[in-house]
Amino acid sequence: MIPEKKRFAVFCSGQGSNFKALRSGFISEQLPAEIVLCISNRSKSGAMFFAKEHGIAAVHLSEKQFQSFELFVEELLSTLKRYKIDYILLAGYLKKIPPKVVQAYAGKILNIHPALLPKFGGDGMYGLNVHQAVIDAKEKESGATVHFVDEEYDRGKIVLQKKVPVLETDTPEILAERVLRVEHKIYTKAVQKLLGWNQSGV
């Protein structure tokens, strides 16, 4: 009997390069999973366009659309329920996940961060800010981390990490490109681990 595919939502704010890599990885690795929903806080994000082009539901949800934060959270949870989402993957999503969503999907939300956590995580540590901080600290290596999401920024249990060297000639942009290539490789592997853990009852 073929197991029913787990249903994933991807949350994005930007161009969605990790979203694209995940979709490709799900297909090439033949995971028992599919991305059925893209949620973005930006209506014209590249990720939204990519989702629509590939038959994936694309929903724009932002706090600015609602009279209160509570109403926003209700709609977010309602949307996830409507699409029967099993797991959430954050891929360049620049908003903190509301506590009610974290609780509803405890142990089922992953994020990818462009540094070796626990170093260089937390509020404001995203995009080029992270890579500039790594260079300023004269680190010899950086990398990418996939971790579970909890109520605190970048503090959840680490699932997978991969290192890259930091070179003396690096700019934040150059380091970002090197780390992004690693991100694209490890996110699907982290999802494989997640599915394996749950199938084994761990």
Image (cartoon, grey):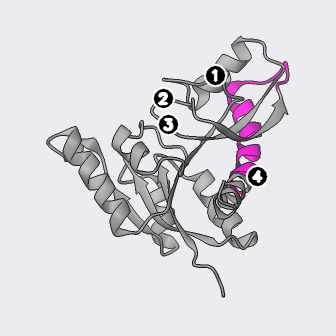
Question: What residue did someone put label 2 on?
Answer: 152
Q: Quadrant of the N terminus?
A: bottom right
The reply to whether the magenta stretch includes residue 54 is no
Q: Residue 108's spot in the image, x, y percent?
A: 53, 52
What whole-number distance in Å separates the C-alpha atoms at marks 2 and 3? 6 Å
Choose between 95 and 43: the one closer to the eye: 95
Three-letter amino acid code at disc 1?
Answer: Phe
Question: What residue did someone put label 1 on?
Answer: 120
Q: Residue at x 70, y 64 (%)?
A: 25
Q: Residue at x 33, y 68 (%)?
A: 82
Choose between 196 and 109: the one closer to the eye: 196
Question: What residue did someone put label 3 on?
Answer: 150
Q: Residue at x 75, y 69 (%)?
A: 29
Mark 3: secondary structure? loop
Q: In the orientation shown, which residue stands out farthest toward the left?
A: 67
Question: What residue did someone put label 4 on?
Answer: 185
Which mark sits nearer the N-terminus, 4 or 2?
A: 2
Mark 1: secondary structure? loop
Mark 2 near mark 3, Cβ–Cβ under 8 Å?
yes
Three-letter amino acid code at disc 4?
Answer: Lys
Q: Main secondary structure of the magenta part?
A: helix
Magenta region: 166-188
